Image (tube, rainbow, N blue to C red):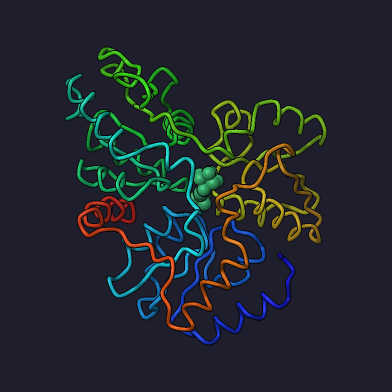
Amino acid sequence: SPSDPDLVERARAAKAKLGDKVFVLGHHYQRDEVIQFADVTGDSFKLARDAAARPQAEYIVFCGVHFMAESADILTGDDQKVVLPDLAAGCSMADMATAEQVAECWDVLTEAGIAEQVVPVSYMNSSADIKAFTGKHGGTICTSSNAKRALDWAFQQGEKVLFLPDQHLGRNTAVRDMGMSLEDCVVYNPHKPNGGLTAEELRAAKMILWRGHCSVHGRFSLDSVNEVRERIPGVNVLVHPECRHEVVAAADHVGSTEYIIKTLEAAPAGSKWAIGTELNLVRRLANRFASEDKEIVFLDRTVCFCSTMNRIDLPHLVWALESLAEGTLVNRIEVDKETEAFAKLALERMLALP
Ligand code: 13P
Ligand code: SF4
């Protein structure tokens, strides 16, 4: 259980026994009981960059979801082993784009005669297969903190972007940050023949958005924003760009988890904030800033935790750390060599973005 002092002590002891052999990374959406054991916390970009920060650590325990652990494996040395404390910690958005579907989409673009003009830009929240596809076709990975820079780069390489798999981040970045219009974007539905699009529609589009979304952020609505503004006069609405376009358009501030934290750190005392992102982070921030007289509420009380992020709990972390401390490698995430080579190309393009 969250407050079980016995488990806290066991995690501490196993981590102490492992010493420099283990490096624990924690995404901001992790539970408090887990995040307290992270050597580094961050958004997806920061964790990808920092994964390689401890080359001497034999084990990297990733407290986050599967695609993050895969990315850490891709970006670290062959002798470093990445461990995901619960293998069921996936991401429903990442699952919305499979390698077969994306290969089929590329055939559709080829038949429409536009594949040569298209640069794939894939959100970090995708499988290693999708990252490899992206690298193979001259594209880059992005996260919510560098999506605009990734799109700027991509539009220097080609005339059109295939954005995978989060339609909302793609649309929000194109319209809010790049000055494109909603009409510049089309949505490719992998469950329909030809993505549900005609060749003319594909030729006219600048942004071809994959029909994927985050099951947590997709639940915030324009009503959530209107209701909180009515309930808390003067409230600042701060949301993640995985939210739907109308929510982002109605918000005061938009950014990644790291941006959300920095914004609240800089906020003046007496200010009021409604946050549209995962609940573990919002609760932690509400508690942290309560003493500074910053009022922080969850944008919509009917939205819940990310259930897969929450799979990493203290019992799983203790089990993973104790197993490693006893010399038993468990729950290793290992991307095969060929996939890794192309996925790494795409990830390194992201890390080199200006
Ligand atoms: P960031 O931490 O990069 O903002 O990502 C949010 C997210 O949904 C990760 O799953
Ligand atoms: Fe995936 Fe959304 Fe959960 Fe992030 S919050 S891991 S995008 S389902």
In the image, is 44 to the left or to the right of 31? left
Residue 41, by quadrant, is bottom right
Q: Residue furthest bottom?
A: 17
Give 250 or 92, whichever is nearer the viewer: 92
**Image-based side of 99 in relation to 168, left or right:** left
> From this viewpoint, is residue 6 visible?
yes
Residue 26 at x, y percent in the picture: 53, 63
The answer to which of 260 and 341 lies nearer the viewer is 341
Please report the residue visible at 66 percent of the width from the left and 66 percent of the height from the top.
33
336 lies above or below 22: above
| Residue 205 lies in quadrant | top left
Position of 339 relative to 62 (above/below) = above
Number of marks present in the image shown: 0
The quarter of the picture where the N terminus appears is bottom right
On the question of residue 177 being in view, the answer is no
Q: Position of residue 354 (x, y in %)?
A: 33, 51
Counting from the top left corner in percent of width and height, residue 156 is at 25, 37
Residue 119's place in the image compared with 91, above or below, is above
Please report the residue visible at 66 percent of the width from the left and 63 percent of the height from the top: 32
118 left or right of 89 in image? left
What residue is drawn where x is 32% and y is 24%? Answer: 206
Residue in front for this viewpoint, 194 or 172: 194
Residue shown at the point (48%, 50%) measured from the top left: 90
Q: Position of residue 301 (x, y in %)?
A: 74, 39
Q: Is residue 1 above or below residue 211?
A: below
